[in-house]
Image (cartoon, helix red, strand yellow):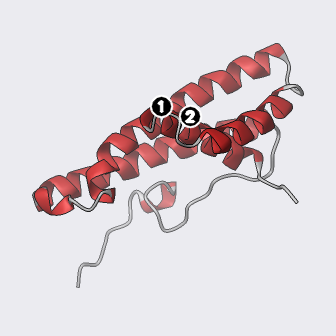
């Protein structure tokens, strides 16, 4: 059985495309699978919808590339070479890029009239959290 929500399919497709470029094609089977599912999905779209989706995919891909650039040292086990303030700076930047990614994913949900949205609660991407104070005790 194959099931993947549209939002996750597109997000993972963007990641798979980046991974393909950065690993010189090591994930060919993964990329082929996502590209096949994506090609089936876009057959149902009008030209205007396809243009909007293409724009969102480009933006999500840019975001994933920036996150990859910020995370690579943290994921490769050499984070001890970075000062703590740099690790914190990257963590905040990654959070901010992910918040932008959520905006594009929700735009895609709107495009497909999906009820499912990416929603974060008790999280800085939740508008209600922007003005709450944090108790540090």
Q: Residue at coordinates 76% horizontally, 21% vertically from top-left?
A: 50
Which numbered dot is residue 21? 1
Give the class, few, some or many, for how many residues have Cα within 10 Å of label 2's Cα (few <14, many ≥20).
Answer: some
Q: Is residue 100 left or right of residue 91?
A: right
Contact? badges 2 and 1 (CB < 8 Å): yes
Q: CA distance from mark 2 to mark 1?
A: 6 Å
Say left or right for 72 vs 86. right
Taking 52 as reference, is 70 above or below it? below
Q: Residues within 10 Å of mark 1 (few under 14, many from 20)?
A: few
Dot 1 falls on a residue whose secondary structure is helix
For residue 69, which quarter of the picture?
top left
Q: Residue at x 61, y 30 (%)?
A: 57
Quadrant location, the N terminus: bottom right
On-image quarter of the C terminus: bottom left
45 or 131: which is nearer to us? 45
- Of residues 53 and 137, the one nearer the viewer is 53
Across and down, in percent, residue 113 comes to: 82, 40
Q: Nearer the viewer, residue 125 or 23?
A: 23
């Amino acid at each position: 059985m194959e099931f993947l929500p549209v939002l996750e399919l597109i997000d993972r497709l963007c990641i798979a495309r980046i991974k393909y470029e950065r690993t010189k094609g090591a994930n060919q089977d993964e990329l082929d699978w996502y590209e096949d599912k994506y090609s089936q999905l876009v057959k149902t779209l009008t030209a205007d919808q396809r243009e909007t989706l293409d724009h969102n995919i480009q933006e999500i891909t840019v975001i994933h590339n920036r996150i990859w650039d910020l995370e690579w040292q943290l994921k490769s086990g050499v984070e001890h070479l970075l000062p703590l303030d740099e690790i914190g700076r990257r963590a905040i930047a990654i959070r901010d890029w992910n918040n932008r990614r959520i905006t594009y994913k929700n735009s895609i949900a709107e495009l497909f009239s999906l009820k499912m949205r990416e929603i974060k609660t008790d999280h800085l991407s939740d508008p209600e959290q922007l003005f709450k104070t944090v108790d540090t005790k």
